Image (spheres, rainbow, N blue to C red):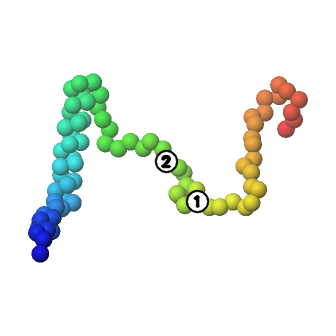
Amino acid sequence: MPNNSSANVQWPNDSYFNQILEKHKKDLAIMFKETFGVELKDKTLVCQRPYPENFDSISYPQNFKVAEFIKFTGEDSRTT
């Protein structure tokens, strides 16, 4: 019977992992402050849609086209 050493490996629990992750985050924040003089924010939202994610997966009818809106300037022959 082969020796399966990976079965005996004990993986750290989530709490331990989170502790290490927080320590690395703090170390990085200190490094950025000391090196570049920049303080990191706790959380940064890069992009957040004002609607639920599943709206993006709704299929549209065949031959559907999004309307093209152009800002009216009054400088050409177009009318409102």
- In percent of width and height, residue 44 lies at 38, 42
Q: Amino acid at mark 1?
A: Ser
Location of the N terminus (image quadrant): bottom left
Place residue 61 in its image quadrant. bottom right
Q: Is residue 10 visible?
A: no
Front residue of this view, candidates 16 and 44: 16
The location of residue 2, given as percent across then percent down, is: 12, 71
Q: Is residue 70 visible?
A: yes
| Residue under the image location 22 percent in, 48 percent down | 21
Circle 1 SS class: helix
Most distant residue in the bottom direction: 1
- Mark 2 belongs to which amino acid? Gln
Kindly state the secondary structure of the residue where label 2 is placed.
loop
Question: Residue under circle 2?
Answer: 48
Image check: 51 left or right of 22? right
Q: Which mark is residue 57?
A: 1
Lower sequence index among marks 2 and 1: 2
Q: Does 4 sit left or right of 80 as displayed? A: left
Disc 2 packing (10 Å; few <14; some 14–19; many ≥20): few
